[in-house]
Amino acid sequence: MCLAVPAKITKVDGDHAEVEIGGIKREASIALLFGEGVAVGDYVLIHTGYAISKVSREEAEEILSTWREIMKAETEH
């Protein structure tokens, strides 16, 4: 199973970017998205340190909301 995390791009430097995931900033490669016009403010899915897909802000928020619901359900049992 592959798990990708939605993240917001906060800085771009060549084929690397600083991304923010839940208030935590990390570096990620954006090389796989070459030619897609990745820019600060965009949302991407991160898997093992690589941005693998651009997503809309709405889609990123929907994914994060679903994860929160899952985590809440887990803690209630």
Image (spheres, rainbow, N blue to C red):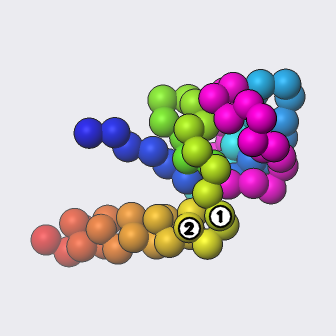
**Does residue 68 appear in the picture of this structure?**
no
Q: Quadrant of the N terminus?
A: top left
Residue that mark 1 sits on: 56
Q: Is residue 70 above or below residue 30?
A: below
Q: Residue at x 56, y 29 (%)?
A: 49
Q: Of 20 and 14, which appears nearest the observer?
A: 14
Q: Are marks 1 and 2 in contact (CB under 8 Å)?
A: yes
Question: Is residue 70 depicted above or below 37 in this figure?
Answer: below
Residue range highlighted in magenta: 23-43
Q: Which dot marks residue 70?
A: none
Q: Secondary structure at mark 1?
A: loop
In the rendering, at what x and y percent does residue 14 appear? 85, 25
- Residue kind at label 1, given as amino acid type: Ser
Describe residue 31's horizontal placement relative to residue 73 as left or right: right
Residue 43's x, y, as percent? 67, 54
Above or below, 50 relative to 64: above
Q: At 75% across and 54% down in the image, what residue appears?
A: 42
Residue sitting at the far left: 77
- Above or below, 70 relative to 51: below
Which of the 4 image quarters holds residue 18? top right
Crowd tier of the residue under label 2, counting other residues whose Cα lies within 10 Å: few below 14, some 14–19, many 20 or above: some
Q: Quadrant of the C terminus?
A: bottom left
Please tell me which residue lies in front, 71 or 63.
63
- Identify the residue at image location x=58%, y=30%: 50
Q: Is residue 41 left or right of residue 54?
A: right
Instruction: Say what secondary structure mark 2 lies in.
Output: helix
Q: Inspect the image, locate mark 2, and give the three-letter code of the amino acid beneath it.
A: Glu
Give the labeled residue for mark 2.
59
